[in-house]
Amino acid sequence: MPVETALFARLIDHAPLFPPANLPLPEALEDHRRARGGPHGWIVRRFVAPASVLARLDGEGLALSVVTEFDLDPSDTRIEAVEVPPNGAVGAVARETYFEVDVAAAPRVVEELARTGGRLKVRCGPTVPALDALAATIRACKERSLPFKATAGLHHAMRRDGRHGFVNLLAASVFDQEEAVLSEEDEEAFGIDGEAFRWRDQTASAAEVERARELFVAFGSCSFDEPVDDLLRLGLLAA
């Protein structure tokens, strides 16, 4: 597998219904169809929707990640993943179930989630979590082999203006020195050299990146174009 594919395949959980896009459902669905049908549609993972719109998605043929506070019908095959807000009452973990936890508390929760089969969801905006807390969370997920996803505030690939970048999160899942990788703002520090992903003088093969992506599963973004355009601008993604 090419390292570009290992890095970015099915990376974006597309969430145009959510802020700041807040698109009406028909427009959100059309935006999602356009993203999936475009040249970089292989980067799309799932359509993120609140449970309240499920009845209006009949016949859409979507792979869904559903945000809900309650258990859902386990026979609904459209639902590939569930995202549980803080204090949600979802009990059964019958599929990919991501529990949103405050980043400051996440390292303490990782062991319990790993034991019960749950997964972790971390929010990176609009309130930006502290860099050291996010680094500790990623490190804990590595130690327990716990899959996680991120959401909010990650339209840009690189860290800028005190906000986290999704390539930084990817790289922190691949390489050690999580704090240093998350704090990286030099756009030349990351690159794809042949069949390797590079951060400064460290490199990772496509196989190593694949293993890291088993941990950092995806990030939610209301925009598909913004993160993809950033990857193209940085030369990390072929046009």
Image: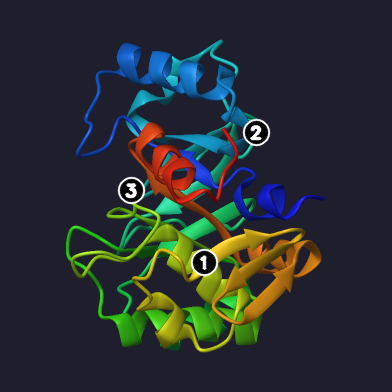
Q: Which residue is mark 1?
A: 190
Disc number for residue 155: 3
Amino acid at pointer 3: His
- The residue nearer to you, when weighing 133 against 8, is 8
Query: Residues at badges 1 and 2 in contact (C-beta under 8 Å)?
Result: no
- The residue nearer to you, when weighing 183 against 12, is 183
- The residue nearer to you, when weighing 229 against 137, is 229
Amino acid at pointer 1: Phe
Please tell me whether mark 3 or mark 2 is closer to you in this view: 3
Percent x, y for residue 217?
Answer: 58, 57
Disc number for residue 228: none
Q: Up-down: is 23 above or below 146? A: above
Q: Up-down: is 185 above or below 85? A: below
Which of the two discs, 1 and 2, labels the residue nearer the N terminus?
A: 2
Asked if residue 56 can be seen in this view, the reply is: no
Amino acid at pointer 2: Ser
Spatial CA span between label 3 and label 2: 33 Å
Query: What's the residue at 70%, 47% (across, down)?
Result: 5
Please tell me whether mark 3 or mark 1 is closer to you in this view: 1
Q: Which residue is mark 2?
A: 75
Percent x, y for residue 47?
Answer: 48, 32
Please tell me whether mark 1 or mark 2 is closer to you in this view: 1
Percent x, y for residue 161?
Answer: 18, 65
